[in-house]
């Protein structure tokens, strides 16, 4: 059976701060909100945020704490322009823009909950340099 990703929902500590980040910094319009949940307008997979303080009523237990719990990747047309835009908005750039061997030029920032957000421009994949074959030494002593 082949599955497709229909929704991505992040559990967040401060719903208002996270909504502001994804709306104002990432640039996603809000589609709907209510009952501790906010969903954004996206193409394809749906993306939403859920108030982590309400997890007990949703799944019967609290959220765990710690460092980054995941990464979201948004495709952009120009990673360098995106980095400039992010800096103007006060976002701290963790890494990039940098070309990656897998075919992306990336810029990374953190959202208010410490999740990694990557903005990736599709570029040509790097081709590993092949070892040049040395001609065999055909002289004999």
Image (cartoon, rainbow, N blue to C red):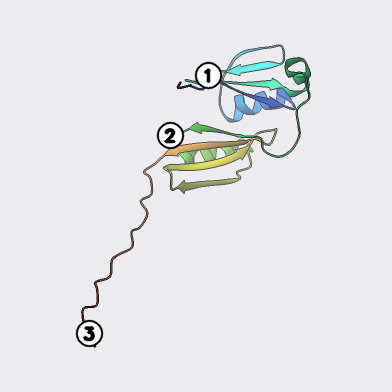
Q: Is residue 46 visible?
A: yes
What percent of the width, then of the height, locates residue 120?
Answer: 48, 37
Q: Give the labeled residue for mark 1.
A: 6
C-alpha gap between disc 1 and disc 3: 68 Å
C-alpha gap between disc 2 and disc 3: 59 Å
Q: Is label 2 or label 3 in front?
A: 3
Q: Give the labeled residue for mark 2.
A: 77
Residue at the limit of the structure toward the bottom, as seen here: 141
Label 1: few (<14), some (14–19) or many (≥20) C-alpha neighbours in 10 Å: few
- Relative to residue 40, is residue 141 depicted above or below? below
Label 3: few (<14), some (14–19) or many (≥20) C-alpha neighbours in 10 Å: few
Provide the secondary structure element on which disc 3 rests: loop
Quadrant (top left, top right, bottom left, bottom right) of the C terminus: bottom left
Q: Give the labeled residue for mark 3.
A: 140
Q: Is label 1 or label 3 in front?
A: 3
Q: Is residue 87 visible?
A: no
C-alpha gap between disc 1 and disc 2: 24 Å
What numbered label is drawn on residue 81? Answer: none
Residue in front for this viewpoint, 68 or 92: 68
Provide the secondary structure element on which disc 1 rests: loop
Provide the secondary structure element on which disc 2 rests: loop
Question: Badges 2 and 3: C-beta atoms under 8 Å apart?
Answer: no
* In this rendering, position of residue 25 left or right of residue 54: left
* In this rendering, position of residue 105 left or right of residue 85: left
């Amino acid at each position: 059976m082949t599955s497709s990703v229909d929704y991505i929902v992040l559990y967040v500590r401060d719903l208002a701060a996270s909504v502001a980040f994804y709306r104002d910094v990432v640039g996603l319009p809000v589609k709907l909100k209510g009952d501790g949940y906010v969903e954004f307008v996206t193409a394809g997979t749906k993306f939403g945020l859920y108030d982590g303080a309400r997890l007990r009523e949703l799944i019967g237990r609290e959220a765990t704490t710690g460092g980054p719990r995941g990464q979201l990747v948004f495709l952009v047309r120009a990673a360098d322009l995106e980095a400039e835009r992010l800096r103007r908005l006060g976002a701290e750039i963790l890494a990039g823009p940098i070309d990656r061997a897998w075919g992306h030029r990336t810029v990374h920032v953190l959202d208010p909950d410490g999740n990694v957000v990557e903005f990736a421009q599709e570029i040509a994949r790097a081709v590993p340099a092949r070892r040049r074959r040395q001609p065999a030494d055909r002289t004999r002593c």
